[in-house]
Image (cartoon, rainbow, N blue to C red):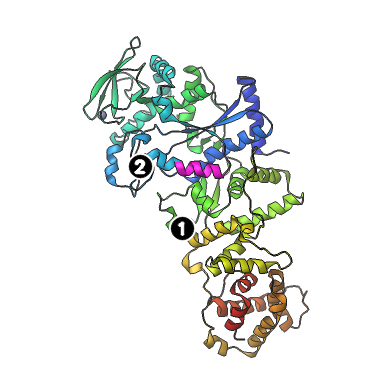
C-alpha cells in the first residue's frame, strides 16, 4: 500500500542513509512571520510533517525543523496598519513593535503565536528554530566568517544568474537583502553579510570594507551612522537570503525540504542555493518537491479582518483538524486545491464522512485509506474526534434554525434517531461548534433560515383543495414519523399518496415535480422562502407544535 507520502518517505530514508548513515533524519520547513500566515503556507509545513510522520511511524528517528524567519527584514507596512510603522522598514521582524492592540512583544511573535497554536491543534510536532535567536547568539559565527572569506566565489556563483537589469531604487533594499550589496563593478566589492545598524536598527547598511585577518567590518548606514565592528564578536546582522538558506541546509543537515512553485524559476533562491551549498558550505541540497498553490473558496470578508488572508487558525474555526489534515494528505504536493469556507464545506464533510464509513467497513481504496490514516492520527497520537458523526450540513441547519440555543439543539439531536438518541451535546462536539461558527461567520445573511413567527394566513387561505390535503397528510403523519428517517419517508410519501402511488414507487419526472411543489409550499409556510435546510431536518428543528401552527392545523 503506497501513496505520495510513503514514496517520499522511501526517498528521504534512502537519501539520508547515503548522506549520514544512522543519523537522525532531518526534514525542514521555513515560515516568515511577516504577516498572517496564509493557509497556502501551511503546505510548507504539512508536506514535511506528513513525510516526517510517516518516517516516525516506521520507527525511525526523524526531526522536523521549523525555521521561523523572524530575523528577516520588515519589508512593508500591510494595509490596515498605521502608516507610521514605515519607520521600522528594514528592522528584523522581532525588533518591530507588534500591531496596535496586540498582546505580543513584537511583530514576529504576534503572527507566530496563532500559527503555533494551530499547528498544535493539527498534531504537527516539530522543533521550532528562531533565526533571531540563532543569529544573535552567534550560532552561525563560523559559517558567517567562512562566507565572508569566500565572498568572491559566492559573488561568482550569484553572477551566473544575475540579470543585467538593476532593481528599481525602491526595491534595491529588498534585492540587497536577497543577494547582498556591492555588485562586482562597485569599488567596495561584494559582501554576503548585512549588518543591522547599531544606531537605527535597520538594514539600510552598506559594507565598505572587511579584513579577513582581524574580521574588522566597516559599514555605513543610510541614517548617516557608520562604524567598524569585529565580525568575530558581532551578532547584529545576517547572511543575505540566497546565502543564508544554503548555509542552513548544510548547518542542519537537511535532507528534505519542499519549496513553493515560485522557486522553480531560473535563478531562484532554491536553484542558486543548490550551487552554493556544495561549492561553499560543503553540504548537499535537500530533496523536496515543489508544492502548488492552495486556494480558498468563498471566505467571508468579516473573518478576514486580521490582515485579509485566511490562516490555519481561521480554517480550524470551521472545520475539525483531521479534515484539514486530510486535504493536505490526499493531494500530491504538485496538485493545487482549495480550502472551502463556503457551502462547499458541507459537500467536503459529506465526502469525509463517506470515507470514514468505507474505512470502517474495509471498503476504502488503499491510497484513500492511507490519506485517512494520516488525517486522523500522527505517529504519536490520535487527533481529537467527534464521537457521533452527525452530518455537518445537518448540524449547520440545526444551529441555523435554533440560532445556537443549546436546549433546542439537544432536543432536535435527540429526536434525529430515537433508537440511539444523542443525549449530550458533548457527543457531537467539536463538530457542532465548528458548524455553528461556520453558520455565524461564513453564511451570508440572505442564506440564513428564519422560521416565521406567525402563520402566513394570506397564503393559507388561498390554498386549493389538493394543497390543503397535502398539508393534512403531512400533519396527520407527524407524530408517527417524528425522526429523521420517519420524516424523510413522510415528506416524500405525501405526493405519492396523493398521486395514488405505493410508498415504494420509483421517482418519475411527474412525481419529482409534485414533490418539489409540495416542498416549496411547506418551506414557504415555515420559513417564508422556497428553499432551506433539508425538509426533514427543518421539521425536526422547528418542532412539531410550531409546525402544526405554521401549517394551519
Ligand atoms: Zn542606521
Provide residue 448's location: percent of width, then percent of height. Answer: 51, 68
- State whether residue 180 appears in this view: no
Q: Which residues are magenta?
A: 113-123
- Quarter of the rendered structure image containing ligand 1: top left
Q: Is residue 39 left or right of residue 367?
A: left
Crowdedness of circle 1 by 10 Å Cα count: few (<14), some, many (20+)? some
- Disc 1 secondary structure class: loop
Q: Nearer the viewer, mark 2 or mark 1?
A: 2
Front residue of this view, candidates 179 and 441: 441
Q: Is residue 12 left or right of residue 117?
A: right
Q: Residue at x 48, y 59 (%)?
A: 441
Q: Residue at x 62, y 86 (%)?
A: 553
* Residue identifier under label 1: 300
Front residue of this view, candidates 247 and 237: 237
Q: CA distance from mark 2 to mark 1?
A: 25 Å
Crowdedness of circle 2 by 10 Å Cα count: few (<14), some, many (20+)? some
Q: Residue furthest left?
A: 224
* Residue identifier under label 2: 98
Q: Quadrant of residue 34?
A: top left
* Quarter of the picture holding the N terminus: top right
Provide residue 386's location: percent of width, then percent of height. Answer: 63, 54
Amino acid at each position: 500500500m503506497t501513496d505520495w507520502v510513503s514514496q517520499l518517505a522511501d526517498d528521504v530514508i534512502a537519501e539520508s542513509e547515503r548522506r549520514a548513515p544512522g543519523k537522525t533524519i532531518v526534514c525542514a520547513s521555513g515560515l516568515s512571520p511577516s504577516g498572517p500566515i496564509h493557509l497556502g503556507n501551511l503546505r510548507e509545513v504539512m508536506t514535511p510533517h506528513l513525510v516526517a510522520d510517516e518516517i516516525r511511524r516506521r520507527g525511525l528517528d526523524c526531526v522536523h525543523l521549523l525555521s521561523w524567519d523572524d530575523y528577516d527584514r520588515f519589508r512593508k507596512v500591510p494595509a490596515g496598519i498605521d502608516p507610521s510603522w514605515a519607520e521600522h522598514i528594514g528592522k528584523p521582524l522581532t525588533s518591530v513593535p507588534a500591531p496596535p492592540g496586540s498582546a505580543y512583544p513584537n511583530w514576529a511573535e504576534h503572527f507566530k503565536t496563532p500559527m503555533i497554536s494551530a499547528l498544535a491543534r493539527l498534531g504537527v510536532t516539530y522543533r521550532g528554530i528562531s533565526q533571531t535567536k540563532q543569529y544573535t547568539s552567534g550560532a552561525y559565527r563560523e559559517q558567517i566568517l567562512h562566507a565572508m572569506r569566500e565572498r568572491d566565489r559566492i559573488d561568482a556563483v550569484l553572477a551566473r544568474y544575475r540579470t543585467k537589469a538593476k532593481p528599481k531604487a525602491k526595491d534595491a533594499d529588498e534585492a540587497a537583502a536577497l543577494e547582498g550589496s556591492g555588485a562586482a563593478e562597485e569599488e567596495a566589492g561584494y559582501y554576503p553579510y548585512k549588518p543591522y545598524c547599531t544606531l537605527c536598527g535597520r538594514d539600510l547598511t552598506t559594507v565598505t570594507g572587511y579584513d579577513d585577518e582581524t574580521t574588522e567590518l566597516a559599514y555605513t548606514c543610510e541614517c548617516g551612522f557608520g562604524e567598524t565592528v569585529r565580525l568575530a564578536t558581532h551578532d547584529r546582522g545576517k547572511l543575505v537570503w540566497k546565502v543564508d538558506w544554503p548555509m542552513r541546509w548544510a548547518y542542519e543537515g537537511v535532507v528534505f525540504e519542499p519549496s513553493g512553485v515560485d522557486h522553480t524559476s531560473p535563478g531562484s533562491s532554491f536553484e542558486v542555493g543548490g550551487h552554493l551549498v556544495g561549492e561553499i558550505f560543503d553540504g548537499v541540497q535537500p530533496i523536496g518537491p515543489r508544492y502548488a498553490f492552495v486556494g480558498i473558496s468563498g471566505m467571508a470578508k468579516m473573518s478576514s479582518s486580521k490582515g485579509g488572508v485566511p490562516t490555519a487558525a481561521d480554517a480550524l474555526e470551521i472545520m475539525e483538524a483531521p479534515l484539514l489534515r486530510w486535504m493536505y494528505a490526499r493531494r500530491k504536493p504538485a496538485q493545487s486545491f482549495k480550502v472551502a469556507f463556503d457551502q462547499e464545506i458541507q459537500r467536503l464533510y459529506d465526502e469525509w464522512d463517506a470515507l470514514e464509513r468505507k474505512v470502517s467497513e474495509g471498503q476504502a481504496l488503499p491510497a484513500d485509506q492511507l490519506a485517512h490514516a494520516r488525517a486522523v492520527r500522527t505517529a504519536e497520537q490520535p487527533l481529537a474526534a467527534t464521537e457521533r458523526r452527525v452530518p455537518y450540513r445537518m448540524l449547520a441547519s440545526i444551529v441555523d434554525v435554533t440560532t445556537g440555543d443549546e436546549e433546542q439543539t439537544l432536543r432536535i439531536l435527540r429526536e434525529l434517531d430515537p433508537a440511539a438518541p444523542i443525549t449530550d451535546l458533548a457527543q457531537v462536539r467539536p463538530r457542532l461548534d465548528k458548524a455553528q461558527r461556520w453558520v455565524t461567520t461564513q453564511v451570508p445573511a440572505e442564506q440564513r433560515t428564519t422560521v416565521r413567527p406567525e402563520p402566513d394566513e394570506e397564503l393559507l387561505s388561498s390554498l386549493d383543495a389538493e394543497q390543503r390535503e397535502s398539508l393534512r397528510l403531512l400533519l396527520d403523519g407527524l407524530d408517527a414519523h417524528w425522526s429523521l428517517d420517519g420524516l424523510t419517508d413522510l415528506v416524500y410519501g405525501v405526493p405519492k399518496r396523493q398521486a395514488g402511488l405505493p410508498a415504494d414507487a420509483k421517482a418519475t419526472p411527474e412525481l419529482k415535480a409534485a414533490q418539489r411543489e409540495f416542498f416549496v409550499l411547506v418551506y414557504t409556510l415555515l420559513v417564508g422562502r422556497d428553499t432551506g435546510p433539508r425538509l426533514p431536518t427543518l421539521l425536526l428543528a422547528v418542532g412539531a407544535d410550531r409546525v402544526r401552527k405554521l401549517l394551519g392545523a
